[in-house]
Image (spheres, rainbow, N blue to C red):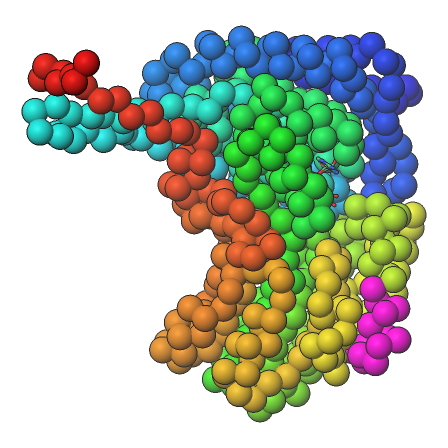
Amino acid sequence: MTTPVYQNFINGHFLKNQSGETFAVKNPATDDVIYYVEVADAFIQNAAIQSAKQGFAAWSTMSPIERSRILLKAVALLRERNDLLAKIEVLDTGKPWQEAECVDVQTGADVIEYFAGLAPAQVGQQQMVGEDFYYTRKEPLGICAGIGAWNYPLQIACWKSGPALAAGNAFIFKPSEETPLGAIKLAEIFIEAGVPAGVFNVVQGAAEVGQWLTQSADIEKVSFTGEVGTGKKVVASAAGSLKDVTMELGGKSPLLVFDDADISQAVSAAMLGNFYTQGEICTNCTRIYVHKNVYQQFIDELKTRTEENIIAGDPLDPNVNFGALISKKHQQLVMSYIDKGISEGATLLTGGKTLSPASAPNGYFVAPTVFIDCTDDMTIVKEEIFGPVMSVLTFDDEDDVIRRANDTHLGLAAGVFTKDIKRAHRVIHQLQAGICWINSYGNSPAEMPVGGYKQSGIGRENGIETLDHYTQTKSIYVGMTNIESPF
Ligand code: NAD
């Protein structure tokens, strides 16, 4: 059987590049090349811009309610094709089918549905100024670009394109070179639903194609999801044409477990916030601060549940709840952090090794890993690992743990477990993070704005305010009186 080769998706169809350059995509659970993808060369890049200009002209002049109807058709198609799309996500990312089947496509569809609903409700203002008045219009920005990470490929494409398209923009999306197929399927669905050609183009490639997007003077905004270091490069490059930016970057988020917390619930949150999607989630609570009075109980239950309930293996097996990391390189990076944890004096409670499960012996697995006896200055406590590695620390003073939790340049997420309602709010209000949970962890519904404080991001995705990030306000002053002129 020949291995498929996917072209870039431009102006409503696949378009062959001229350079002939391709890259391979591997299934992280098998180490097999599953398909090839053509790189977006200069010919494709130019075609993407020309087609987006035409797409924008058609789409931005439709009424918001027309756009809304079309987007809702795309939502229905996404839901109809859930299993097919979820399987693509499993093969590309190595995450368990168990998750992809009920989360990845659904949460992507939810966000497009949410913004499709909001689009017709976005209104300008009108105000009298003496006898004159002004009014404002919310106009789309033009051509916007999205650059995605590999952990939730289709969901990221939906979370970026949903508000962008609802507001009337055209969009050029570059998925991660590790997981390029989901975005193509979304592009096909948009066309099938009736989105005009050119409104959503997909360009493929790695950093170079991303750099082109951030530099292009034809693009008004870039919405980026990825590492902090890459985000800084994107912002610097976007500054050359004064683009608007949304940055969804990394984190090293704290979870504070007080001594009155429901400990089983807190363990559930810690496990979800470190082992779901094999730890490759930006909001993960990789620093768990546990009150000294409940520390032993917490780590005893954590160890038992981690060792007994996590099933690593072929991610397509519905019983498997723990998949493979995205690449061999990433597996090695995560293992190098584990080695640092050991050499810097942390104690392994469990895990700390690669896995080779019988059903997926060549996959890039790392065992769910918990370090105890951690201190705030350890590398594993300070740096984002983006794998299944949890660091547990202890505390006995509220003010002190808040200070320690905030002692980082990152500020994506945070959580608190306590039954004391006053403490819950008092503590969470002091934590420097954009996405916070009380007695919960990880849920991110379409309605709730998400984004980072400090170096974890700029701007927000989801929630009503995101529509503002994809529109610009035009003020129109209307003279009802004669102009008084000194000339
Ligand atoms: P990455 O920064 O390596 O790559 C992200 C994207 O940027 C890819 O598409 C890549 O091709 C592209 N890229 C690389 N160099 C570029 C450049 N110079 N200019 C423009 N584009 C460039 O990140 P990753 O490894 O794909 O993803 C993991 C990271 O993403 C983690 O740090 C994680 O925390 C973060 N993340 C954040 C969120 C969030 O919402 N805050 C969500 C998911 C992932």
On the image, the x and y values in percent for residue 133 come to 15, 25
The one nearer the camera, 395 or 126, is 126
Which of the 4 image quarters holds residue 442?
Answer: bottom right
On the image, the x and y values in percent for residue 478 come to 18, 19
> Where is the C terminus found, in terms of image quarters?
top left
Q: What span is colored magenta in the figure?
A: 337-349
Left/right placement of residue 463 relative to residue 96 reads left
Q: Is residue 404 above or below residue 83?
A: below
* Rendered residue at 65%/15% (across/down): 48
On the image, the x and y values in percent for residue 297 come to 63, 85
Q: Is residue 474 above or below residue 372?
A: above
The one nearer the camera, 376 or 22, is 376
Which of the 4 image quarters holds residue 120?
Answer: top left
* Rendered residue at 80%/22% (across/down): 39
* Rendered residue at 71%/70% (across/down): 381
Can residue 436 be seen at all in this image of the molecule? yes
Which of the 4 image quarters holds residue 83?
Answer: top right
On the image, the x and y values in percent for residue 153 come to 66, 37
